[in-house]
Structure formats: structure tokens, C-alpha cells
Image (cartoon, grey):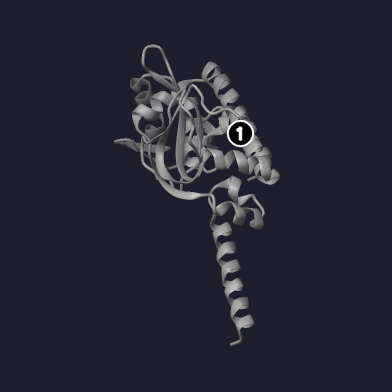
Amino acid sequence: MTRETHLEHAASFVREGLENAHGDERNRILKALPIAEYDRLLAELRPVRLPLKDVLIEPNTEIGHVWFIREGVASMLAEEQDGSSIEVGTIGREGFVGLPLLNGVDRMPYRVLIQIEGDAWRMRADVFRRVVDERPQIRHRCLRFAQYFSDQMAQSVACNRLHTVEERCARWVLMTHDRVDGDHFELTQEFLAMMLGVRRAGVSVAMGVFQRANIVTYVRGRVTVLDREALERGACDCYRITRAAQARLLGE
């Protein structure tokens, strides 16, 4: 084999590996990038595990990294004066944690922690700023996610005002189910209470409705979705509105 032929085989092997990595990519922002742009970005990303309850961002503290979630769910929490917390938004494989950096801001008043464990690509904040300044396609995809997240938060405000606990509970379980593999996931009463803005007793009542109807099982913080279609029928229209926004802005 000549040196030129050897180099051609090596280049072919590298291209095949890159194509496989891009094809297997689970973060939707990164997967939507052209493969050449994805290749350039990989050098700036570091794989990290996201343990349950791991805090990614503290309130009013400089944001040091962004996380492109590949599996799992991060929860953005607002803290009340009495020490309680309520969720204002969730982020899964459709997006990234660290949105303020996209707008030139280095901190926010919310805590972000891991609600369902998984893994992500992590990038330093200064590198992210440079990347979105220099690479229009990446900036475009991040901005579309930012719009989707804004729509999600606005819909959640309306949902909390207009709909029953059971309807809202179905919506949040569906949104979590969308972001995990399979029909089983861990979701503690503590997190569900924060997500819904109710006491834990309210969570038990809402999940009890779905369990008695054989739509889900909920045992020791572990949810199993038994009847997805019935769960969707039990959710308010906010779920369908949010999913439509995601499809429009991020693609199916």
C-alpha cells in the first residue's frame, strides 16, 4: 500500500467515525448542525455525567459553562421568600443549559439542577461566547431554542393559572417522558411538587388518579407510563401547544 493510499484509508476511517458520531448525536441542537460544523465544535466539547440533584447553576452566580444535554432533564427553579422553590422551566436533549450567555449575560436569578440524571456535552462559557459570535449556524440554532424555551415558560404560566392539578401533572409527566428513553424514569414527589407548585399531598392525589385508571404506575418515585395515549387525553392543551412550538422551532 502506498503512502497516499494509506492516507486515503485513514481519512475515510475518520470521516466514517465522524458520520457515525453525528448520526448518533442525541442533543437536537448539535444534531441539526451540518456535519462539518459539528466536527469543528466537537473539539470544544467535553462529555460529563449529570447526577441526580447536581446543581449546574446557582442563582446570581457567574455561569462558568454551558451544557448541551444528551440524556436527562435539568430543572430551572425560582426560590420563594419562605425557602420553597417552584419550577419555571425544564431543559432536555432539545436544548442547552446556560441561556443567559447567549444574550451576553453571565448570571441569572434561578437555580438549575438535574431532575433526571443523564449526560451532556459541556463547554466553557468563554468558548461558547466565541463560538456563537463566529459561527452563524450554531448561533441560529441556539436562538431558536431560546425562543422555544421562552414559549415554554409563557405557556407554563398560563397552565398554572388555568388548569387543574391533574391536567398539569399529566402535562409534566408527558414532557419528562419525551426526554427519556423508554417508559420508566425516576421522578420524586419533591420534584413533582416543585414542577406543579403544590404540596406533596397534591402530587399523591394527582398521580393516584392516573394509577387507578391504569395510565401510569408510581412507586417510590419511579414512574412507568402504561398508556401514553390516555395520558395525552388527560393533559391540558398546553402540552400540545408546547409540542407544536418545539416542532416549529426545533424540528421533529
The reply to whether residue 168 is in sight is yes
Residue 234: where, in percent of width, then height?
51, 30
Does residue 178 appear left or right of residue 216 in this picture? right
Residue depicted at x 41% and y 36%: 114
Question: Residue 132 location in percent, x, y?
Answer: 64, 41
Near-viewer residue (85 or 1)? 1
Q: Which residue of the protein is positioned furthest toward the right in this rendering?
A: 136
The residue sitting at the left extreme is 220
Residue at 65% x, 50% y is 33
**Residue 212 occupies quadrant:** top left
Mark 1: give few (<14), some (14-19) or many (20+) Cα within 10 Å: some
In the image, is 244 to the left or to the right of 189?
Answer: right
Quarter of the image containing the C terminus?
top right
- Image quarter of residue 201: top left
Q: Position of residue 182 (x, y in %)?
A: 44, 49
User: Is residue 95 visible to us here?
Assistant: no
Q: What percent of the width, then of the height, locates residue 40?
A: 61, 54
Q: From this view, report whether residue 244 is shown above or below residue 166.
A: below
Question: Horizontal placement of 245 versus 223: left or right?
Answer: right
Q: Amino acid at mark 1?
A: Leu
Residue shown at 37% from the left, 34% from the top = 211
Query: Of 58 and 28, which appears nearest the observer?
Result: 58
Residue in front for this viewpoint, 232 or 120: 120
**Residue on which the image places disc 1:** 102
